[in-house]
Amino acid sequence: MTDKSGYAAPLFFIFLAFTISLTSGYIYENQLHNVTQTIKNSRLYVDSFDATSTQWLTAGTAPYLDAQDEPNNYVYTVVGGAGSKDGDLMGDFGFEDHDATGTINSVTLRVYGRADPSKPLQRYFSVWLWDGNSWNEVMNFRGEGSWTWKEVDVTQYLNTWNKINQAKIRLQTEVIGVTGGGHACDAAVLVIDYTL
């Protein structure tokens, strides 16, 4: 007769390791599921243009910056022509509203545009953000001859749902000692990361 007591301990440890592995996997899955349910990400695209400033030219239909769709709908300046003077403005562009629930973790402004590459330090355009109380210069396009997305963290300006829902942007031509212009902007979006 064979002694089977020597097999009991290894079988017990195999069973124990299997049980721990299943339990750990279950806990990890539940934690991962809870995280994906509580952290949210919303994209609020431009949905209005109030024509407060119209010193740039337009192509297509308003609100112009509501989608990445150039050459269909966008705003632009011409070197030595429309929108080429220092301080020439285009705006204001408002964003979609959010239902104002949850804790704001971060807010990022993303803008799709291009700038005349010939004199990037002297001929460019800036993006200004309205936070419900004041205008803040938050970004500029300098020498990006091809269409490109740029982004900046604007959480310090848009740290409440009320400010997010009042947010708007305007574009401003910047010229230093040369003829300005040669810029374009096609899309803008606020990306909100928040926790429920």
Image (cartoon, rainbow, N blue to C red):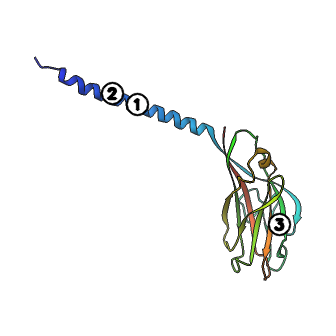
Could you tell me if the residues under marks 3 and 2 are in contact, i.e. CB atoms within 8 Å?
A: no
Amino acid at pointer 1: Leu
The image's mark for residue 22 is: 1
Give the residue at mark 3: 58
Task: Say what secondary structure mark 1 lies in.
Answer: helix
User: What residue is rendered at 79% in x and 78% in y?
Assistant: 180
User: What residue is rendered at 87% in x and 69% in y?
Assistant: 55
Q: Residues within 10 Å of mark 1 (few under 14, many from 20)?
A: few
Between discs 2 and 1, the one toward the N terminus? 2
The quarter of the rendered structure image containing the C terminus is top right
The quarter of the rendered structure image containing the N terminus is top left
Could you tell me if the residues under marks 2 and 1 are in contact, i.e. CB atoms within 8 Å?
A: no
Amino acid at pointer 3: Thr
Q: Nearer the viewer, mark 3 or mark 2?
A: 2
Near-viewer residue (173 or 186)? 173
- Image quarter for residue 80? bottom right
Question: How far separated are the C-alphas under marks 3 and 2?
Answer: 70 Å
Q: Nearer the viewer, mark 1 or mark 3?
A: 1
Query: What is the residue that sits farthest to the right in this orientation?
Result: 52
Q: Position of residue 59 (x, y in %)?
A: 81, 66
Give the residue at mark 2: 16
- Image quarter for residue 17? top left
Q: Position of residue 66 (x, y in %)?
A: 76, 56
Q: Nearer the viewer, mark 2 or mark 1?
A: 2
Q: Position of residue 164 (x, y in %)?
A: 77, 49
Compared to 33, does 94 lie above or below? below
Compared to 192, does 31 lie above or below? above
Query: What is the residue that sits farthest to the bottom in this orientation?
Result: 178
Asked whether, in this view, residue 20 is left or right of residue 137, the answer is left
